[in-house]
Amino acid sequence: MRAALKEKIKNYALGLGLDDVGFGAVADYKSKLSPRIETIFPKAKSLVVMTFKELSNCESDNARIAMGGRLDIMEFMKSSNYKLARYLERDCGVKAMSTPLSYPLNMAPESRFGLAADFSQRHAAIAAGLGNWGRSNLVIHPKLGSRVLFSTVLTEAELPPDPPVTEDLCIHCNLCVEQCPGKALDEEGKTNEMKCLKYSQPFGIAGSMKFWSKFAAATPDEQKKMLGTEEFMSLYQAQGIGFQYFCFKCYAQCPAGG
Ligand code: B12
Ligand code: SF4
Ligand code: SF4
């Protein structure tokens, strides 16, 4: 009965056109920094984790083309999230909740101003047997490699979990560490978030704070000039589209998997 429901859900999810789907038990979700799943959805028993392979856009040195590919995949992911959760509720008769694949994030100090998500997609992927940690701190999928994104639907249905990936998929080539422009991966098992952010999101929150502090201290004439700069326009654009990544190196260049 549970196995049949799992199969039905799996077929539906794969039919959406995504690349892989895994099932995990809530008890196997082991994120130290994110809140317990019970605080989000008390009846949740299973995680249905979807895997999406990113296009080659992320290899491009053109930051707009690279981010354009990310925006495309995020749209597909959000729609798949909603469709799968709705399928569980409407067609399978079980409660389900989608989880954000990136934003919104909790901006309170205890969540490190948005750096610890309410739900960790990497820990969910590991619980659902979709991969394990690489030296980059990204989750490597056995067939699809590092260049994948994850999104999860939580459900009250008890679905048989998939076996964990136990082998080390990272080939320890050290490319991610060497190629990181921000030296954010030097310490094993830890991403220096501030160093990563400086390179990967130059027009993110830190860039915004820098600009607006300068703006506040400027004369009206200087302010007028500042609003005509590439810096302001870039901040405006990054905010308009949610955020804009300028670096995909650890993610796009990893040779593991497949
Ligand atoms: C906030 C965030 C960021 C922040 C902070 C990153 C961070 N250290 O957590 C910043 C902006 C820096 C960032 C950068 C990137 N991100 Co990001 N990010 C997120 C987000 C929204 C939340 C992450 C979170 O909650 N972190 C806090 C908790 C979970 O981290 P943690 O418990 O401390 O675990 C960390 C370490 O302790 C360590 N770790 C924990 N347990 C273990 C166990 C072992 C054995 C090892 C070795 C390590 C290890 O790994 C973690 C990474 O530092 C997630 C989406 C989501 N909701 O999950 C995407 C997500 C993690 N990001 C993703 C990506 C792709 C990126 C970037 C490549 C940017 C880009 N251009 O796309 C870089 C990669 C940086 C890197 N190599 O670590 C993907 C990763 C996919 C994958 N294949 O693993 C995610 C899952 C988005 C998604 N929906 O798929 N990100
Ligand atoms: S780039 Fe090399 S060292 Fe880094 S995660 Fe991939 S396989 Fe591992
Ligand atoms: S996204 Fe870029 S800056 Fe951030 S850890 Fe990866 S390679 Fe380094």
Image (tube, grey):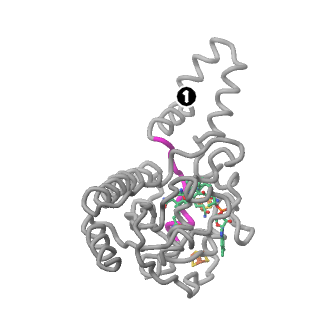
Within-10-Å neighbours for mark 1: few <14, some 14–19, many 20+? few
Residue 227 appears left or right of 151? right
Residue 156 appears left or right of 196? left
Above or below 211: residue 108: below
Q: Position of residue 191 (x, y in %)?
A: 68, 62
The overriding secondary structure of the stretch rendered in magenta is: loop
Q: Secondary structure at mark 1?
A: loop
Q: Which residues are magenta?
A: 242-253
Above or below 246: residue 17: below
Can residue 247 be found in the magenta stretch? yes
Identify the image quadrant of residue 212.
Answer: top right
For the N terminus, give its image quadrant: bottom left
Which residue sits furthest right?
187
> Closer to the camera, 75 or 241?
75
Residue displayed at 62% across by 34% down: 208
Residue displayed at 72% across by 72% down: 188
Q: Position of residue 162 (x, y in %)?
A: 44, 80
The amino acid marked with disc number 1 is: Thr
Residue displayed at 75% across by 68% down: 187
Mark 1 close to ligand 3, CB under 8 Å? no
For the C terminus, give its image quadrant: bottom left
Which residue sits furthest bottom?
167
Where is ligand 2, by quadrant? bottom right
Residue 10 appears left or right of 191? left
Which residue sits furthest top?
220
Q: Position of residue 71 (x, y in %)?
A: 40, 50
Residue matched to label 1: 229
> Closer to the camera, 139 or 90?
90
Residue displayed at 63% across by 63% down: 180
